[in-house]
Image: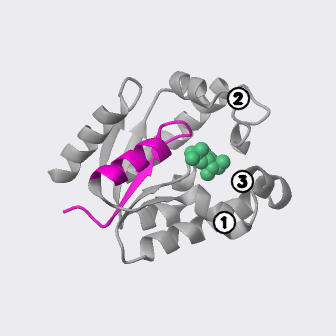
Amino acid sequence: MTKPVIALIGLMGAGKSTLGQALARHLGLPFVDLDARIVEQAGKAIPRIFAEDGEDAFRVLESACLEQCIASPQGCVLATGGGVIIRDNNRRQLGQCTVIWLDASPEVLARRVAGDGNRPVLQGDDALVRLRELDRQRRPWYQQCADFRLATDDCTIDEAVARMDDFLRQ
Ligand code: S3P
């Protein structure tokens, strides 16, 4: 049975926000963006949190916001940040959700995030090299958390929503 929170996981550029909004509209559920919650609670943008407080402080906030979103009694479609699966406790929390992994190749992701200065974990490095490394590190965690994997490289928004809907109705 589908759990009330449908969480989308996957690397940066996988389509978590875009497809999350489309899925939420399709299902008539509220859409929640975890990064937006973090920004709201910190009162500053993600690159500033990383620069002024460090990545660990960002991860602590991310865990707290994830817990709040999951604890809310109302169901929703939750777009997480790409690194949410790093912490054990977050992976345990995600066990309370229906988890959909949006999987895309580093080549496609690098094209999608090109020139985006809002992603500090990609700054200063060649985006493709960094995304390949993150893909290698994080793939086992995405795999571990996912109830359903959707490859998004060649998928339109409508196709992706239809495939997620099919899975949710099983
Ligand atoms: C991060 C991904 C970002 C954001 C932060 C860290 C990561 O979210 O949470 O910059 O570690 O992969 P998106 O996946 O929505 O870009």
Crowd around label 2: few <14 · some 14–19 · many ≥20 (10 Å): few
Residue 60: image x %, image y %?
66, 67
- Classify mark 3 as within 8 Å of ligand 1 or not, answering yes or no: yes
Q: CA distance from mark 3 to mark 2?
A: 16 Å
Q: In this orientation, which residue lies closer to the viewer: 82 or 95?
A: 82
Left or right: residue 125 versus residue 160 is: right
Q: Is residue 109 magenta?
A: no
According to the image, label 1 marks what residue?
40
According to the image, label 3 marks what residue?
46
Q: Secondary structure at mark 1?
A: helix
Three-letter amino acid code of the residue under disc 1: Glu
According to the image, label 2 marks what residue?
115
Q: Is residue 109 above or below residue 167?
A: above
Q: Confirm whether residue 156 shows in the render.
A: yes
Precedes in sequence: disc 3 or disc 2: 3
Q: CA distance from mark 1 to mark 2?
A: 24 Å
Precedes in sequence: disc 1 or disc 2: 1
Residue 22: image x %, image y %?
38, 45
The residue range painted magenta reads 1-26
Three-letter amino acid code of the residue under disc 3: Ile
Left or right: residue 160 versus residue 56 is: left
